[in-house]
Amino acid sequence: MIPPDQPWIELNAFVRKKANLATGGQAKILIRSGKVMVNGAQETRNKKKLYKGDKVLIDGKAYTVES
């Protein structure tokens, strides 16, 4: 899931892929609505960098960031 040329992925890109959203704008709305948590804390920053092993909860569904 993390692009091979960098050690991280932005939260909005991760949410868009995992939540099967059509646009980045939809991911932004979901993140800002407070329905996304990173490593147990609510996260509202779209550009938050996620690294391998980070735990993400999207609208009640759990994911782990993988390379």
Image (tube, rainbow, N blue to C red):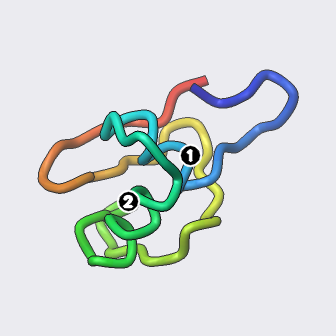
Q: Which residue is mark 2?
A: 39
| Residue farthest along the left direction in this orientation | 60
Above or below residue 3? Residue 46 is: below
> In percent of the image, x 63 and y 52: which residue is there?
10
Residue 18 % position (x, y):
36, 35
Q: Which residue is mark 1?
A: 13
Label 1: how many residues lie within 10 Å, few (<14), some (14-19) or many (20+)?
A: many
Q: Amino acid at mark 1?
A: Ala
Secondary element at tag 1: helix
Residue 28 % position (x, y):
46, 66
The span from disc 2 to disc 1 (Cα, nearest Å) is: 17 Å
> In percent of the image, x 35 and y 50: which residue is there?
56
Give the side of residue 47 with respect to residue 59, left or right: right
Above or below residue 27? Residue 44 is: below
> In percent of the image, x 79 and y 22: which residue is there?
4
Give the side of residue 10 with respect to residue 26, left or right: right
Give the side of residue 59 with respect to residue 36, left or right: left
> In percent of the image, x 56 and y 46: which residue is there?
13
Label 2: how many residues lie within 10 Å, few (<14), some (14-19) or many (20+)?
A: few
Q: Quarter-wise, where is residue 46 in the image?
A: bottom right
Numbered label tally: 2
| Residue farthest along the right direction in this orientation | 5
Q: Amino acid at mark 2?
A: Asn
Q: Which label sits in the foreground, 2 or 1? A: 1
Residue 57 % position (x, y):
26, 52
Work out whether mark 2 precedes mark 1 in sequence or the reverse, and give the earlier one: 1
Secondary element at tag 2: loop
In this rendered view, identify the residue nearer to me: 25 or 39: 25
